[in-house]
Image (cartoon, helix red, strand yellow):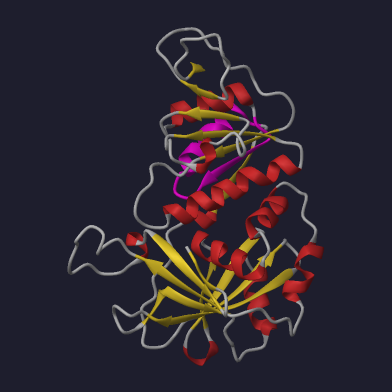
Amino acid sequence: MVPSAGEFDEHSHRFCATFETENESDATAGPRALIVGDGPRKLGNSTANDYVLAMIAREPKHHQYQVVSHSNNPNSLLMTQWLSDKVYLEPMTEEAVASVARLERPDYAFVPAGKQELGRAIERVSPTTKVVVIEATQIPKNVVSSIPTLEFNGLFDGQVVYQLGVIGELKDQGVGKYQTLAKCYPAHLELDPATSERAISQQETPSLYQVLYQAEGVHEDVLPLTAPDIAFMTKVLGMNLTAIWVRLMIGRFSGQALVKASHEGTTYHGAIYRAHFPYADYHLTNQKSAPATVIGAQIERANKGSEQ
């Protein structure tokens, strides 16, 4: 692998593969964390995914890890030197990812959900690497109903569930029903929080989760917290949930940062999340709103205007 361009005697932090035999990339010194990108920018929650990946890349630096990123998206935030000490601009293939892992031998490798084959390729060439799947990058489950879905959110550290509050769905202006594309925080759930905590504590893996409720207080499902909700709740709580999740994954977690969020009676300023769609921008008609066609979102805070 050689630095991109390669015409001058310069050692950039960006590298790409060539068909030549020279390799100017030396293994990064010290503890290393490899961040695998989510691929090209596309409709859906890729903007939120890139935000989560950027926050994942930022956190290991605070714990003295060198951050190595592998991406094929030149527009990704992972490309910046402020987030990545070294970048491999490579195809998202098993061969390319394995080549990077074989050289770098990272302590941790963070791989987006849906790309687990890349994680297995890393494990084959670097057995000492702990591969962590970023479940937050999954496409959110789209629930359309005449009854609003309530989402109880919490972080499970393997023993304790820390409450992060409840999100409630709003009526989507396009379909006239409640949908995951418009939400408010906080919402009220008439149910003992211990019931939701038990549902989360039964999960096999420590992580950020949400319990979905509809009629009669019976939970429909327990799912990993998705990237749009992580971004939304990070803004509302003023607490970097991605950073807290990374600390949990690398064994640096302390529940002290979540005491305020989980304390009964804690209140926060209300906020509304509304997904944005590019239909008008691209002169598209008769399109159905769904998580797969989101291009961004707007967050409206009480008495504070809105944020993009």
Judge left or right: residue 229 versus residue 251.
left
Q: Is residue 123 magenta?
A: yes
Judge left or right: residue 127 versus residue 276.
right
Q: In the picture, residue 170 is in which quadrant?
A: bottom left
In the rendered view, tell whether residue 143 sits above or below residue 88.
below
Return the x and y of residue 127 as percentages of the image width and height: 63, 31
Looking at the rendering, the stretch of residues picked out in magenta corresponds to 106-127
> Does residue 59 appear in this view?
yes
The mark tally for this picture is: 0
> Does residue 224 appear in this view?
no
Return the x and y of residue 24 as percentages of the image width and height: 56, 12
* Residue at left offset 45%, top offset 26%: 95
Q: In the picture, residue 92 is in which quadrant?
A: top left
Return the x and y of residue 270 as percentages of the image width and height: 58, 80
* Residue at left offset 47%, top offset 13%: 6
Return the x and y of residue 74 as percentages of the image width and height: 43, 35
Pick whichever, 203 or 301, lies toward us.
Answer: 301
Pick whichever, 107 or 16, lies toward us.
Answer: 16
* Residue at left offset 51%, top offset 42%: 77
In the rendered view, tell whether residue 251 sits above or below residue 199.
above
Q: In the picture, residue 101 is in which quadrant?
A: top right
